[in-house]
Image: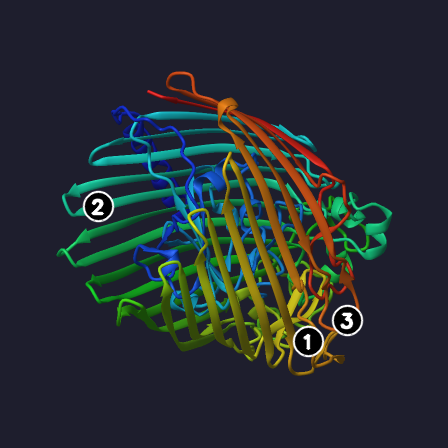
Amino acid sequence: MKKKTFKSACVFSLSPLALTLMSLPGHAQDDSASSQSADASPVVVTATRIEQRSFDVPAAINSLDQQQIQETARIEVNISEQLNRVPGTVVQGRESYAQEQQIIVRGFGARSQFGTRGIKLLADGIPAGTPDGQGGPGMFDLSSAQRIEVLRGPFSALYGNHSGGVVQVFTEDGPEDPTLTVQGMAGSYGTWKGGLKYGADSGSVNGIASLSRYSTNGYRDHSHAEKDQFNAKLRLSIAPDTRVTVLVNYLNQPNNEDPLGLTAEQMKENPRQSIAEATTFNTRRNLDNLQTGAVLETNVTERDVLRFMAYAGNRDNAGYLAIAPGTQNSIRQSGGVTVLDRDFSGVGLRWSHITDPLTFTVGTDYDNASEDRTGYLNFTGAIASPSARGVKGALKRDEKNSVKSWGLYTQGEWRATERLSASAGLRYTKVKFDSQDNFICTTSLVTAPGATPGTCSGSTTAITASNFNPDDSGSVEYSAYTPVAGLLYRLTPAINLYANVGRSFETPTFIELTYQADPNAAGPNLRLKPSRSNHYEIGAKLMLGNDTRMEVALFHIDTQDEIVVASNVGGRQSFQNAGDTRRNGVELSLDSRFGRGLSTYVALTYLDAKFKDSFNTCISVPCTTPTGVVDAGNKIPAVAPYNAYAEVAWNYAPLGLITALEFRAQGKMYVNDINSASADAFTTWSVRAGLEQRPGRWRLTEYVRIDNLFDKDYISAVAVNDGNSRFYFPAAGRNFLAGVTASYAF
């Protein structure tokens, strides 16, 4: 009842928001596009929480603008469309919308079994994940995004529980003229998308709303997906120095099919196939996510800014897995259907004092997520001959989980001289996990709903003194101080040199705490420790004339107690601490604008990520005790040694022609800790072209795009340490996209 009340209130609130947007009056504006010269370094806020040119920040941070996000002939559905052009950043997509995309920054986040972990995700300053570090980039609405900021390195530690970096998406403001935009596109594999966007500005009121529907049959068999998304932002100036911004985001993905991973032999046979079990058990996911938030900003004085943020939401998720009926029959097994109903909320308060030469910020934040998680058989009927697979059956799991995070931080910048600036910060973070097991089947106590005397719900096996489902309740708390410091030296007006150092920590997620490697062991894996990393980075930012900007960063990262996959089979993943790891890398980007509409962009990454200590892992099934040896010096799986992105674009203004050739390359990466199997290196090419017309108050754009131009077979994502050797998720072959966008300014 609580969930329905919350959702009804949020949906009801959309009506006045939409009415407000539709009623905004407009003002005449010339919105003609103008190319930005490369020396205009973008303004960013993620690194310091205060607006500042990225050129003057002593950290590796990239900002993708609205043109790069929305005007490159893309479907505007997946974050991988944009982030693979950022140095040090890779997005793995499993060609299945049942599995959210996996963002990897400097090798962190590579172990994630689904979605993104170890990377802080924010949408307009509001977390797009849970306090345990798990996030879903699928809620980012790219069709209304103004910019995306990617912060890498130690300064991201000031955002709390994660190791790799911060990815923050900012929603665009409404234009001065009330403007309605209609978008339609279609492509290979039965893919299509339609969208509407309306925005306007009226002095004290500014707003924008975006609504879209996406559908695809998918490159592989059994990979049909649909995605409905709504994103809105309404900003009210309630006083000359006070602004309130209201944000609403809704995401619905019903019955998105999952073809599952393939073995190397299956890849060679037919990369478009799904495994038989995917069809038999109708593997899929239903996702429904709604959240709303508000941000209040006020200038207390000319030098002091106070910001208060609050948000709340609900997430429903039902995943159907392919697990053998005999395995699901085990008393300890949680079944082939996982259902969660999660409520989440949080608040944040921040005060910034801006002076010359000293600027500093003090803030605190609190985030909470509470979920009911249940598991069921993925079939009905007898264990010996199960029928109606792909249907939720008897209850197998029932627990109440909560995770809370509280943080206090301060950071500041001191401009010591005209040439030298110093930045520093410190954060204290506490994360508490609590799990209450309501599904117990022992000889002395049975709390599992639906259980009969002597048996446990969803199992035909009798309860005995040695075969039972114990109380798996437990709680654990982690905390850490994470300091950072950096120096920036202005060698010349066009060359900035910087260095920074810091420490981050990353707790296990709830999913990683759920199971122990020994399937007979009771309770969650509370022995799992957080990983802690020491980051060191030096870099240079150069303006080469008025038309070229270059950035280079060299980094070294030592991690203690790296969390790795211990076993991954039968829908059950367990994790362990592997000792120490080391990451050494170089990142380079070069952005050049030439005359006659010609421009180029290059992003290169070299990364050596390896285990410093040897440890044991599971290499056979079943596995109660890891016995396989991972040698010191082995490469961290799912981390490629190099990544490259390059683009040559040409804009011919007299015809409104925009065209570009894109190149991407990735090195060979291992798929397990013992480095016995790998995904080969690959290179791909893409081409895009578009035409633009501006008759009167209209703006019309037609575009086409071809990805994987030479129809290469390659791996787009891997499942680390998969116990069935189904490591591989093939990328789509050559595919086409064509679309039209029409905007009218009233």
Of badges 2 and 3, the one in the foreground is 2
Q: Between 183 and 152, which is closer to the camera in this rendering?
A: 152
Which residue is under mark 1? 518
Residue 200: x, y in percent? Answer: 31, 30
Which residue is under mark 3? 622
Which residue is under mark 2? 243
* Dot 2: element: strand
Question: In which quarter of the view is residue 193 placed?
Answer: top right
Question: In which quarter of the view is residue 412 placed?
Answer: bottom left
Which sits earlier in the primary sequence, circle 1 or circle 3? Answer: 1
Q: CA distance from mark 1 to mark 3?
A: 9 Å
Q: CA distance from mark 2 to mark 1?
A: 54 Å
Give the left or right position of residue 140, taking residue 359 as reference.
right
Residue 320: x, y in percent? Answer: 65, 50
Q: Between 385 and 632, which is closer to the camera in this rendering?
A: 632
Work out whether residue 108 can be spotted. Answer: no
At label 3, the amino acid type is Pro
Instruction: Judge whether 720 appears above or below 148 on screen.
Output: below
Which sits earlier in the primary sequence, circle 2 or circle 1? Answer: 2
Q: Between 429 and 723, which is closer to the camera in this rendering?
A: 429
At label 2, the amino acid type is Arg
Which sits earlier in the primary sequence, circle 2 or circle 3? Answer: 2
- How many labels were placed on the picture? 3
Residue drawn at x 49%, y 41% as measured from the top left = 69
Work out whether residue 451 can be spotted. Answer: yes
Q: Residues within 10 Å of mark 3 (few under 14, many from 20)?
A: some
